[in-house]
Amino acid sequence: MPTPFHQALRALLGPKGALPADGLSSYETDWRKRYPGRAIAVARPATTEEVARTVQLCAEWRVPIVPQGGNTGLVGASTPDDTGTQLVLSLQRLRELRAIDADNLSLTAEAGCVLADLQAAAAHANLLLPLSLAAEGSCTLGGNLATNAGGTQVLRYGNARELCLGLEVVTPQGEIWHGLSGLRKDNTGYDLRDLFIGSEGTLGIITAATIKLYPAPAARSTALVACPSLTACVALLRLARQRLHDGLTGFEVMNAESMALVGEQLPQVPRPLGTPPWTVLIELSSSVGTTAAQTSLEAMLEEALMQDLADDAAVAQNVQQARGMWQLRESIPLAQAQAGLNIKHDIALPVSAIPDFVTRVDALVLRHAPGARLIDFGHLGDGNLHYNVQAPVGSDAAAFLATYEAAINEIVYDAVQLAGGSISAEHGIGRLKREELARRKDPTALGLMHAIKRALDPLDLFNPGRVL
């Protein structure tokens, strides 16, 4: 039976904007199926003003709010807990592309716009929106900014924070901050934009953003490279930077286990180089045309082969082959999901420290959990490694997770801390890493974060229990 709160929400948003508490499983369960919850209701406002009025209603009734975009997150930040007291506020109906300013190289869009749609809109104007990640067909702009998403082109263009020029945000008091701007320079006080980017919905709800665009490259050239070791991959990265300069837009690494897992779970995905110890995916973007880009990349690869940094290489000869190479890289998370629950680590390290880290941590993990499958891959160009641990072949994945997750996390995060790295590179904290953050973050930094949260959200209504 509808409560007075449900009645008020329905009166505010109508039947399309206020969903009852039953039949909400797609909003209540995360992509990894690790954080199922139960919502008091789901709100689907269609405008920023409706978001603000919904927040005001929740403040009046003291109903906590869990903002949600495409629900593709991996750390449990965008689904409700199991109390049945939290409102899921979905931004999926805020889908307007407000403007593309070609002269200012910027795009303004609402938070519910799907990333791939914005990329296509920019491309239609012969411009590039460089934020790119595996979930781009379903993740949304607001979620990308709330988590400070990274992806495959951070090496050249930076993560979501570097690409954002301005924001429109609803505060915990239900006020609207009209901070949309295409300005590259604005020194009028504190940079409020940076407070909300990466805050995972705990400080404000992003409803729109202005994003940097770039001239579309005249050509892209893509290659897969077989390397004998991770040390060779790092040396190859150094060579690629020297020879390709700022045209180097992608440098991804994948170990043999990750390639083997794709072969098992997704045999239709081509693997041109098989399963060498390490596979590198390189992308070069060029303003001078396809032939010049291909020539530059091939010359660099010939040098790498002569220096024994690579054992083999395959250069894409057309767009279809290039897409196939990227599909191989982007299929790893799906292959892991099909193989069962796994222990994920989204970590950042100095690039120079990664080979030694992997060697040491691999040995420690296998000593603790014999037979575990070490699925190492990620964005070597910016030091972001996805160090994931899969259950041994034929074993129960859920049982493996329950038995080994805490100990393996301790091994990995201790080594990350020792190397001066970060326990979260691009996925965020959410619920998954909340306790680890409390243990490992500098106490002064934690104190400042708590002070900001108390100042902006004194009732603790925005995504409570996430991050802090």
Image (cartoon, helix red, strand yellow):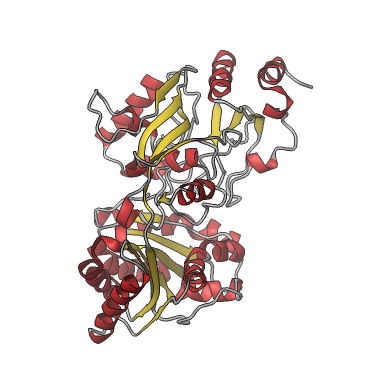
Position in image of residue 137 (x %, y %):
56, 52
Quarter holding the N terminus is: top right
Q: In this view of the protein, which residue sits in the foreground, 326 or 390? A: 326
Q: In this view of the protein, which residue sits in the foreground, 132 or 146? A: 132
Position in image of residue 115 (x %, y %):
50, 47
Quarter holding the C terminus is: top left
Answer whether residue 186 is visible to the viewer in this image: yes
Instruction: Using the image, determine if residue 317 lies above or below residue 409.
Output: below
Q: How many discs appear?
A: 0
Q: Residue furthest left?
A: 242
Position in image of residue 275 (x %, y %):
46, 80
Answer whether residue 203 is visible to the viewer in this image: no
Q: In this view of the protein, which residue sits in the foreground, 117 or 49? A: 117
Q: Quadrant of residue 101?
A: top left
Q: In this view of the protein, which residue sits in the foreground, 115 or 442? A: 115
Q: Residue at x 38, y 36 (%)?
A: 197
Q: Residue at x 53, y 25 (%)?
A: 48
Q: Quadrant of residue 90?
A: top right
Instruction: Using the image, determine if residue 242 lies above or below residue 348.
Output: below
Position in image of residue 61 (x %, y %):
59, 15
Instruction: Using the image, determine if residue 262 lies above or below residue 450.
Output: below
Q: Is residue 106 left or right of residue 118?
A: left
